Amino acid sequence: MKKGTESRTQGVLKRISGPVVTAVGLDAHMYDVVKIGHEELMGEVIKIQGENIIIQVYEDTAGIRPGEPVENTGLSLAVELGPGLLTSIYDGIQRPLEVLVEKMGDFIERGVSAPGLSHEKKWEFVPTAKAGDVVKAGDVLGTVQETNIVHKVMVPPNSKGGTIKKIAAGSFTVDETVCTLEDGTEITMLQRWPVRVPRPTKEKLNPDIPLITGQRILDGLFPIAKGGTAAIPGPFGSGKTVTQQQLAKWSDAEIVVYIGCGERGNEMTEVLTEFPELEDPKTGKPLMERTVLIANTSNMPVAAREASVYTGITIAEYFRDMGYDVSLMADSTSRWAEAMREISSRLEEMPGEEGYPAYLAARLSEFYERAGRVVTLNGVEGSVSVIGAVSPPGGDFSEPVTQNTLRIVKVFWALDAKLSQRRHFPAINWLDSYSLYLDSLTEWYDTEVSPEWNPLRAWAMAILQKEAELQEIVQLVGSDALPDEEQITIEVARLIREVFLQQNAYDAVDTYCSMSKQYDMMKAIRAYADLARVAQASGATPQQIVTVKSKNDLPQIKFIKDYEPALEKILKDMEAEFDAMRAA
Amino acid sequence: MKEYRTITQIAGPLVFVEKTEPVGYSELVNIVTADGTVKRGQVLDTSDDIVVVQVFETTAGIGRDSGVRFTGETIKMPVGKDMLGRILSGGGKPIDGGPEIVPEKRLEITGAAINPYARASPEDFIQTGISTIDGTNTLVRGQKLPIFSGSGLPHNDVALQIARQAKVPGSTEEFAVVFAAMGITREEANYFMADFEKTGALERSVVFLNLADDPAVERTITPRLALTTAEYLAFELGYHVLVILTDMTNYCEALRQIGAAREEVPGRRGYPGYMYTDLAGIYERAGIIKGVKGSVTQIPILTMPGDDITHPIPDLTGYITEGQIVVNRELHRKGIYAPINVLPSLSRLMNLGIGEGHTREDHKKVSDQLYAAYAEGNDLRGLVAIVGKDALSERDQTFLEFADLFEDQFVRQGLYEDRSIEETLDLGWKLLATLPEEQLVRIDRELIQKYHPKYRKAAQG
Ligand SMILES: Nc1ncnc2c1ncn2[C@@H]1O[C@H](COP(=O)(O)OP(=O)(O)OP(=O)(O)O)[C@@H](O)[C@H]1O
Ligand SMILES: Nc1ncnc2c1ncn2[C@@H]1O[C@H](COP(=O)(O)OP(=O)(O)O)[C@@H](O)[C@H]1O
Ligand SMILES: [Mg+2]
Ligand SMILES: [Mg+2]
C-alpha cells in the first residue's frame, strides 16, 4: 500500500490459467478474499509478486477474460459461526448446498454467493449472564436450543470483553444484538472467524479418555483418545470411507464434522439420507442433529477443495469452544494435498517430492495441530479429535502424504487390500496398525471397562502376533506339521479374527458394538482358549479341540442385540463339551 | 469475427498467439489453415501478452500464416431428441451420412457438478444376468462401475452382454445407450456396432467414435460430448441412460501427451498431477437427481497397462468410481467366460440396491460368504502347490474344492446366458452347501435355515 494514498481496492485481470489468475493495479494482502470478473467469482490471494497479485479462484474460470475487474474485499477467508450450523451441508467455502439448489437448481453454477448461516431465521436466546456481569473473550452469554444440541453464545475470542450493560431473552436473528457492553460493544450470535487461523484456547490437556467408536478393532486394539489424531490410509475400496462414516455415526462425540474433500457425490448423499434416520446410541436423537457436513466433491473446484478442510476444522473448534467433544473426519486428506499440488504447480513453484509443494509437511502438521483436548477460554473442557483418510497412489504407503501424516498422528489404522478382498472388514491390518495412546488410556479401561481388559487386550495381540509367525511355517509345511499347542493357537487366532475383529458395518446390530459387549466377546474367546489348554494338557487332540461345536455359535453373537443369554448358553455348552472330552 | 495472424509458436498440440483482444479462458478457437481447413481448439491460458490454444486435431498444416478466430464462447454441444440412433465423430460431427443434428439446446460440454444436495441415492437394482456382477458386485442405476481389463481380454463381450441384458426387474421405463469410443480400432468399433445393430439397440443409442487413427487430442473432449448428451437424455428427456466409455486408457494417454507438450511437471509415471481431478470431471457425471425422472449409469472400460491395477490409470479411476469389475487373464486362460475375478472387484453401491425390497433378504450375507470362502480356497491353492493336497486338513480341502466349483459354476456362464437374481443366489447357496454348515460364519442362523438347500429340501419334502 502506498503511503498517504488510498488503498486500491479495484484492479484488473491480467492472466487466467485455470483456477489461478493474476490481477494488477490492486493493493492486497495474503489471503484477502477478492471478487473476480463481472460475475464476481470468489477468490483468495495466495501470492504477491511485485505488481502481480496471484489469486486462487473458488469457482470455474471458463470464459473469464483479461481486463475484467477484480475487487479486493480486504477480508480474509472466514466462516460464519453461530446457530444454524448443525444439520447443514456446505461446500468447501461454506456455501450451504441446500440454498444453492434453491438459487440455481440441481447443478452448481458459478457466481452465486450464499452466506453460511441464515440471516433471517430467528432463534430463541436465553441469557445465562446478566447485566453487571464482567465478561471476557470466550465467556458464555446465553444459549440457543439449536437442535437437540444446546448452542452456547459466546463473547468472540478476539473481543476485549467488559461489563454487560444490557442482555435479554428473546427471539433474534444472528445479526441482531443480544448483548451490549458498557463500552458500547454490541455482541450478536454471529462470529466470523478466518479459517486459516486456529481459534485460541487456554490450555492443552493430556488425552486420557478414549473416543469410543463402537468398532471392536478400534476401541479394543487401537483406540484413539478424545482430542487425538488418527490416520487411516488405504488403497481404493479398502474401507476408508466406511470406517469414517462408522465413526461419524457411532463415536461418542457430541458434535461431528464430516468433510468430503474431493471424494464422491453419492457418498455425501448417502450420509444425507442415512443420518436423519439413525439414532445416536447415547442420546437416542437423530444423528443428523449433531452433524455438520462439508461436501466439496472431486468434480467441484479444486481451490475450494483446498479450503474445505480449514472450513471444517474451524467449525469444529467453534463447538469445542462451547465445551463439546467434537470429532472431525476428513475424507480424504490426499485430495486436499493434491489440490495444494495443483495450485502450487500453477504458481510454478519449485516442486518437492512427487510434485507436492515443499510446504506439504508444514500444512499437514498445522492442520493436525488444531486437534486436541483443551481447556477453553471460558474454562471448560472440550476436544477436537481429527481422523484423516489418506489415499496413497497404488496403495503404496511410502508416498509423501502418507509418510508426512504418519510423522504427526498418534494412531495409524492401516487398511490392507488383502483383507478387503476377502471381505474381512474393517480391513484394518492388526499387525501394522498402532495407537500411541494405549498407555495414557490404560487407566480409563481399568476403571470404566474392567481391570481385566488391558491384560486381555495384550493377550489377544500376542496371539495374533504368534499366528503371523506360525502362518509363515504353515506356508512351508502345512498346518498338520505344527505342534499340537500351536494348532490351538491358530484356531484361537481365527476366532479372534472372525468373531472379534470382523465387524459388518451393514448389519443392523453388528454395526455398533458397545464396550461391554466387546469385553464379553473377547472374554468368551479367552474362555475357549483356556479350556482348550487344559484339555490339551490332559491329553485331548487338537482335532477334538478344534471341532468343539459350541464355539461355532460365537460369530452369531454379533448379530444378536440382547446377546447375553445366548452367550451364556454358548459358554455353558462349551464347558460341557470340554468336560465330556476330559471324561472320555 | 476478428481473425489474427499472430501465431508465434507451435509445439505439439499447442499454438501460441500474440497481441489479441482479451480472450476468455477455455474459449473455443477456430484456426484456419492456408488451404481453408478449419481446426478447432480451446484456450488453455490467456493473458494480455499471449494466448495458448490447445488444438483438438492434428496441427499439420498450421503455420505462422494461419488465421486464428476466437469465438467468444466456451465449447458447446448441440443436443436434441433426434440424436438417438445417430453416429457421430469423436468431435461430435455426424459421420453416418445423415443430416446435421437439429439442436434443441446447446450445452456446455464440461458440465457443471451435480449439487450433492440434489442427488438421490442410487438404489434400483440393475439385473445384468451375469452372476459375478448381480450376485457379488451388484450394479445399481446411477452408478459408475468401470471394467478393469487387460489387452486381449474379452471386456468388450462383458460390456456388450451388460448392455444387452441390463434391466431393472419390474420396470418398463425408457432407456438409452450412449457409447463413446476413444482410440479403439475400427475392428473393435465394428464389433460393438454390429452387436448394437443385431439387437436393435442402435435405435436408442448415440454413438461417438474417435478411433485409433483419429487425433489423440480430440479424445479429451469425446467423453465430455458423450456425457453432455447422456445428461440431456436423462435429466431433460427422462431416459435411463447407460454410458459406455472405451478405452479410458487411451483418453489418459492423450492427457499425458498434452501435459508433456505444455512442459508441465509430470506426476506419477508421467501422467499429469491433475489427472485425478480431470477424471473426476468425467466419472462424477453419473447419478440420479431428486425429483427428476432419468438417470445416468456409467460403465467405463479401461485396459490396465501390464495388467497392473496399481498403474495410475486404474488406480485413479478406482479412487473415483463406485467400485470396479476386474477381468482376469488367468480365468480367461482357463477358458472361463465371463472371466471376472470377484476378489479385487467391488460394487460400493451394492448395499443400497440389494436385500429385502430390492433383491432378496439373504443377498448380502450370501455374497459375503461366497467371497470369504472363495478367498480362502484360492489362498489354499498356493499352499497345495508347496505341501501337496494331503497336508491339508479336511476343512481346508472342502474350501479348496469350493474355489474350483465357484469358478466352474458361478463364474462360468454363457455369452447369452441371462440368469435371474434368484437363479444366481440359489446357485450361490448350492455351492455354499458343499461346505460344512458351521463354516458359514458370515450368515445368520435364520437365513441358513430358510435358504440352505438342506433345509429347503426338508421343508419341501
Ligand atoms: N485368513 C486370514 N484372515 C484375515 N487376514 C489374513 C488372513 N491371512 C492373511 N491375512 C492378512 O494378510 C496379510 C498378508 O498375508 P500373507 O501372509 O498371505 O501375505 P504375504 O506373505 O505378505 O503375501 P505376498 O508375499 O504374496 O504378498 C497378513 O499380514 C494378514 O494381515
Ligand atoms: N466395516 C465394513 N463392513 C462391511 N463392509 C465394508 C466395511 N468397510 C468397507 N466395506 C466395504 O468396502 C467397500 C469400500 O469401502 P470404502 O470405505 O468406500 O473404501 P475407500 O474409501 O477406502 O475407497 C464398501 O463399499 C463396502 O462394501
Ligand atoms: Mg472412500
Ligand atoms: Mg505370501
Image: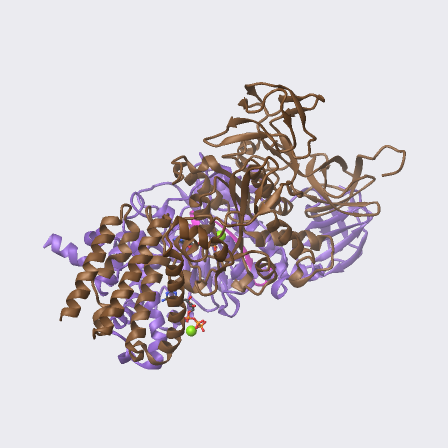
Q: Position of residue A33 (x, y in %)?
A: 71, 38
Quadrant position of residue B255? bottom right
B70 sits to left or right of B419: right
Quadrant position of the C terminus of chain A in the picture: bottom left
Q: State the residue in front, A479 or B187.
A: A479
Residue A423 seen from this side: no
Quadrant position of residue A575? bottom left
A492 sits to left or right of B5: left
Q: Position of residue B360 (x, y in %)?
A: 28, 48
Quadrant position of the N terminus of chain A in the picture: top right
Ligand 4: image quarter = bottom left
Q: How many marks?
A: 0
Residue furthest out toward the right: A4
Q: State the residue in front, A384 or A377.
A: A377
Q: State the residue in front, A316 or B83.
A: A316
Q: Tell me which colouring the rendered structure shows.
A: by chain
Q: Position of residue B405 (x, y in %)?
A: 27, 68
A111 sits to left or right of B192: right
Q: Position of residue A544 (x, y in %)?
A: 20, 71
Magenta-drawn segment:
B201-215
Residue furthest out toward the left: B461
Image point (71%, 53%), residue name: A346
Residue B202 shown in magenta: yes
A68 sits to left or right of A429: right
Residue B288 shown in magenta: no
Residue A370 seen from this side: yes
Colour representing chain A = brown
B436 vs A198: above or below: below
Image point (47%, 30%), residue name: A147
Q: Which chain is purple?
A: B
